[in-house]
Image (cartoon, grey):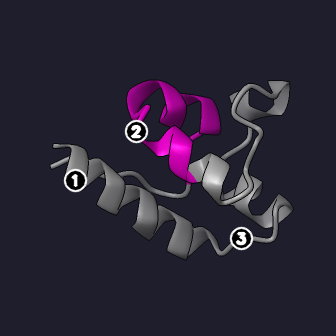
């Protein structure tokens, strides 16, 4: 069973788990194609957008599990 942590880069997340992209966009993280997404972790992106990293990770892991 796949799961992610808040340490994953946003680019890696999008590449490995494309099902996370709609959720990120829905949450207001429109930085998927941003140059910073290549080196910014999910936690850093969440904090920059006023999101709770733990809740975001939980929601993405649910989406990943639902896709499996």
Q: Residues within 10 Å of mark 3 (few under 14, many from 20)?
A: some
Residue drawn where x is 31% and y is 62% of the image: 62
Residue ID for mark 2: 19
Q: Residues within 10 Å of mark 2 (few under 14, many from 20)?
A: some
Q: Position of residue 30 (x, y in %)?
A: 76, 42
C-alpha span from label 1 to label 3: 22 Å
Front one among 40 and 57 = 57
C-alpha span from label 3 to label 2: 19 Å
Residue drawn where x is 48% and y is 63% of the image: 57
- Which of the 4 image quadrants contains residue 59? bottom left
Is residue 9 highlighted in magenta?
yes
Residue ID for mark 3: 51
Residue ID for mark 1: 66
Tags 1 and 3 touching, CB below 8 Å: no
Front one among 16 and 18 = 18
Q: Secondary structure at mark 3?
A: loop
- The boundaries of the magenta stretch are 7-23
Tags 1 and 2 touching, CB below 8 Å: yes
Seen in the picture, residue 42 relative to 12 is either above or below; the reply is below
Q: Position of residue 49 (x, y in %)?
A: 82, 61
C-alpha span from label 1 to label 2: 10 Å
Image depth: mark 1 or mark 3 in front: 1
Residue drawn where x is 30% and y is 49% of the image: 64
Residue drawn where x is 81% and y is 71% of the image: 50
Number of on-image labels: 3
Earlier residue among tags 1 and 2: 2
Earlier residue among tags 1 and 3: 3
Earlier residue among tags 3 and 2: 2
Q: Position of residue 36 (x, y in %)?
A: 82, 32
Q: Residues within 10 Å of mark 1 (few under 14, many from 20)?
A: few
Seen in the picture, residue 56 relative to 14 is either above or below; the reply is below
């Amino acid at each position: 069973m796949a799961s992610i942590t808040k340490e994953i880069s946003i680019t890696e997340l999008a590449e490995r788990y494309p099902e996370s992209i709609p959720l990120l966009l829905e949450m207001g993280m429109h930085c998927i194609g941003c140059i910073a997404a290549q080196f910014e972790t999910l936690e850093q992106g969440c904090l920059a957008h006023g999101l709770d990293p733990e809740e975001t990770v939980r929601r993405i892991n649910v989406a990943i599990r639902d896709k499996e």
